[in-house]
Amino acid sequence: MTTEGNSPRPGALPVALREIQDRVRGRSDAVLHEGLADIGVDFMLEHVFQKVVPAAFDPSSPAEPRGTVQFVLGSPAGERAWALTRDEQGLHARAGSVDAPDATVQTTMVNLLRLLASEKTVAAMMDTRDLHVTGREDLVRALPAWIRLPA
């Protein structure tokens, strides 16, 4: 979302997790919010859930647990919902709320980017309440294995 220094650049968006790391690590929340405003929160979420996460999916990750994790993400543009489902065919994302998800994660868009950049871990975010989980915590704790992130 940002390139040299702190200037946001809505050009080519990262697909690889390492590219997100380069653009997120060491940036302040204010700079990340500025970048999101320039790119567009909905566009960035679609990109993350439809391109970045599927590209990072590890098909050799354990098939269990399976289920749907709904993300409720806060941003200056308001709250957005996306869902990830891990099933026998792989990992699938969809925009919007889902009926009866197995787990719901509430956090901010910036925290999601920090998670994808491996700046924070799921466990640490749960401990600090930067990531609030209702429902099956085992699914949320499995996310890093699904997309090759540190636990």
Image (cartoon, rainbow, N blue to C red):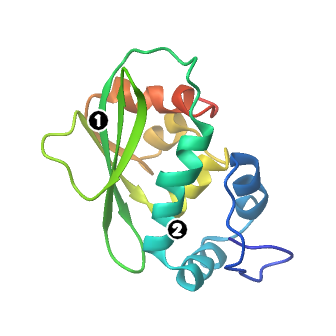
Name which of mark 2 and mark 1 comes first in the sequence: 2
| Image coordinates for residue 49, horizontal then vertical, percent | 47, 53
- Asked if 51 appears above or below 31 in the picture, the reply is above
Does the image show residue 112? no
> Pointer 2: residues within 10 angstroms few (<14), some, or many (20+)?
some
Residue labelled with disc 1: 68
Residue at 71% across, 81% down:
8
Tag 2 secondary structure = helix
Q: Residue at x 31, y 69 (%)?
A: 79
Q: Quadrant of residue 140?
A: top left
| Residue 100, x across and y down, in percent | 13, 40
Q: Residue at x 53, y 56 (%)?
A: 48
Quarter of the image holding residue 65?
Answer: top left
| Residue 86 visible, this angle | yes
- Residue bearing mark 2: 44
Q: CA distance from mark 2 to mark 1?
A: 21 Å
Under mark 1, the amino acid is Thr
Nearer the observer, 120 or 2: 2
